[in-house]
Amino acid sequence: MPFAPLRAAHLAALATLALLLSGCGIRFGDDSSTDLFLDLRIRGKPAMGAEMALEVTYEQRYPVAVDISCFLVHRDRSRRLLGRDTLPPNPDTSAKPTPVAGASTFRFRVQRPGRYVAVCNTPLDPENFISEDFRVKK
């Protein structure tokens, strides 16, 4: 049974990913529990082959650089990395730092219709994420 621990770790990773991709009911704006992300929007016409852009806005409060990653997830659970960005450290190292506002934009196209979820997160803290559902038409 040398594979039992590996199988358990694999199942735990899949459960965590499913929880992350489901969005846990987190929405944008006032309903979000994230302390980094403010908003996520899909720009452009949501049609097959059309250029669209994912724009995520944030407030960087941390005295260290923060990595973010943004993905596009299709309803069949296929996942595509749209881009990564590193937010520079907040120069204000006081006990209550003034957040530094910013935005990251990632351009993309989709080749098939259907429901999608755009997700941005901080890989070191998967609970710090924001998501947006949208539909692509033919």
Image (cartoon, grey):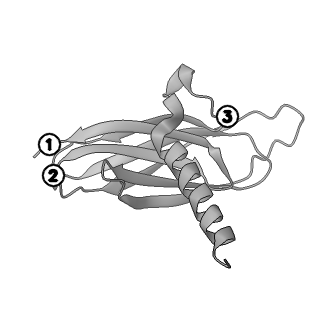
55 vs 124, nearest the viewer: 124
Disc 2 target residue = 48
Task: Name above or below for residue 96 compared with residue 51.
Answer: above
Q: Which residue extends farthest bottom?
A: 2
Disc 1 target residue = 137
Q: Give the mark nearest the N terminus, 2 or 3.
A: 3
x and y, in percent, of residue 5 in the image:
69, 69
- Looking at the rendering, which quadrant does residue 124 occupy? bottom right
Task: Name above or below for residue 5 compared with residue 110.
Answer: below
Disc 3 target residue = 35
Along the horizontal axis of the image, is 119 left or right of 99? left
Alpha carbons under labels 3 and 1: distance apart:
33 Å
Along the horizontal axis of the image, is 93 left or right of 27? right
Kindly check if marks 2 and 1 are in contact, taking CB atoms under 8 A apart as contact. yes
Please state which amino acid type lies under the numbered disc 1: Lys
Q: Give the mark nearest the N terminus, 3 or 1.
A: 3
Q: Dot 2 surroundings within 10 Å: few (below 14), some, or many (20 or more)?
A: some
41 vs 1, nearest the viewer: 1
